[in-house]
Image (cartoon, helix red, strand yellow):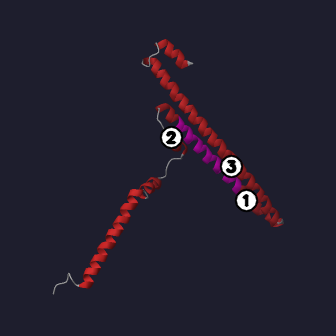
Amino acid sequence: AAAAAAQAAGGGGRGGAAGLLERATKRAERGEAEVRKLRAELHGMRQERTVLQEKLAKAEAAASAAEGPEGGALSEARASAYAAEQRALRAEEEGLRLHCELQALRAAMLGEEQDAAKTTRPPPTDGQEDGDKRYGVRPCIAYVCGCLFFFLVQLCCGLCWRCGCCVRG
């Protein structure tokens, strides 16, 4: 509606304030779409976590029933470990949520065309990028060719040494 009003006021052209408004509206729509997608992904992760928590609770109940009366201290230790793990999961989830929102905001504000894999993936670690380059097709083929060349040179040198054609004297 705002874009239509801007076009009517601007005479239908894409220059000036009307064009800026239209581009800003498009960027905002893309940003909102990214945020909706990320929220859906976060909802799926929360559901998965809930299912895993239920399974863990059932397994702990079965384990404590099998331990008998001396399992009180062990169950307290498990409960404190479980609470610590939950705090760590919440902190990690919050970090991931903030990272995703930052990426969506960056895409909306800068107008970048980013694919879905780039916005949903957490930031890469230091060694991950080097591993991708090292195990590519081209470096692998170059390594194999180098090995074959070395083998053939060694084979030729070994055959010439055995037959004595290169040795004079």
Q: Amino acid at mark 3?
A: Arg
Q: Which residue is mark 1?
A: 78
Question: Which circle marks residue 49 in the picture?
Answer: 3
The correct choice, above or below, for 148 with respect to 3 in the image is below
The correct choice, above or below, for 145 with respect to 6 in the image is below
Residue, far bottom: 169
Q: Are marks 1 and 3 in contact (CB under 8 Å)?
A: no
Q: Quadrant of the C terminus?
A: bottom left
Q: Are marks 2 and 3 in contact (CB under 8 Å)?
A: no
The magenta segment = 81-104
Q: Amino acid at mark 2?
A: Asp
Measured as percent of width and height from the top left, residue 20 is found at 46, 22
Q: What secondary structure characterizes most of the magenta part? A: helix
Give the mark, 1 or 3, whose residue is nearer the N terminus.
3
* Foreground disc of the pair 1, 2: 2
Say few, some or many: other residues with alpha carbon within 10 Å of mark 2 (under 14 / 14 to 19 / 20 or more).
Answer: few
Q: Is residue 95 left or right of residue 85?
A: left
Q: Amino acid at mark 1?
A: Arg
Q: Which residue is mark 2?
A: 115
Give the mark, 2 or 3, whose residue is nearer the N terminus.
3
* Foreground disc of the pair 1, 3: 3
Q: Residue at x 56, y 41 (%)?
A: 100
Residue, far right: 69
User: Total marks drawn?
Assistant: 3
Measured as percent of width and height from the top left, residue 127 is found at 46, 56
